[in-house]
Image (tube, grey):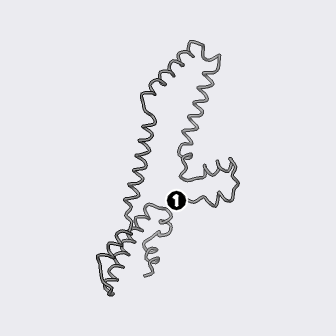
Amino acid sequence: MTISYNQDLSKTSTTFENFVKLQLRWRGSIWKSVMKELFIFSIAFGCITVIYRTEHVLDKENRVFWDNFAELFDQKLNYIPLTFMLGFFVTIIVNRWNDIFLNIGWVDNTALLIATYIRGSDEKSRILRRTVLRYMVLTQAIIFRDISMQVKRRFMHLETMVAAGGH
């Protein structure tokens, strides 16, 4: 679902505070989906840092142990090609989005084929082409109703679709 925030951006000044407010207001924002995990990670990281840096909690022997433990994980991380894995992940996501977009079933190409194969300039041919395309547009509107909330609000019931059709 596409939501436009252009008016909100033009009304507010471009300060960091307004940027943060806009980021947290977005319905599809990445920040809203990871905010809880980010907060928990930040608290845990802060606690571990305070414990590690405080002289009274860890003695020198335990601090050396944790340094070696961290070095072990750092060495093992070199075995995993992280940039390759991130590139592979992004490729999969982009291909998945592209497949969804291509499988929507647009009416345009089929309308051109119908106009090509159902020939004739008489009334019967014109009505046949028009009827087939109207059914295709109706099918597409019903499918878009399940996908988009804006289309769902516009065509809540089949009666609203019939009223919009003009017949």
Q: Identify which residue is drawn at 61% across, 22% down.
A: 51
38 to the left or right of 56: left
In-front residue for pair 82/57: 82
106 to the left or right of 30: left
Q: Identify which residue is drawn at 50% across, 58% down.
A: 1
Q: x and y percent of residue 143 in the render?
A: 40, 64
In-front residue for pair 138/153: 138
In the rendered image, the vertical position of residue 71 relative to residue 128, given as above or below: above
Query: Looking at the figure, which quarter contains the C terminus?
Result: bottom left
Given the current orientation, which residue lies at the most extreme top position?
61
46 to the left or right of 137: right
Given the current orientation, which residue lies at the most extreme bottom position?
122
Q: x and y percent of residue 72 in the render?
A: 47, 21
117 to the left or right of 69: left
Q: Identify which residue is drawn at 56% across, 35% down.
A: 40
Q: x and y percent of residue 132 in the render?
A: 33, 76
Residue position for label 1: 2
Q: x and y percent of residue 130 in the render?
A: 36, 79
Other residues around mark 1 within 10 Å, as few (<14) / some (14–19) / many (≥20): few
Q: Secondary structure at mark 1?
A: loop
Q: Identify which residue is drawn at 43% across, 49% down.
A: 94
Q: Quadrant of residue 41?
A: top right
Counting the numbered discs, the total is 1
- Looking at numbered disc 1 in the image, what kind of residue is underneath it? Thr
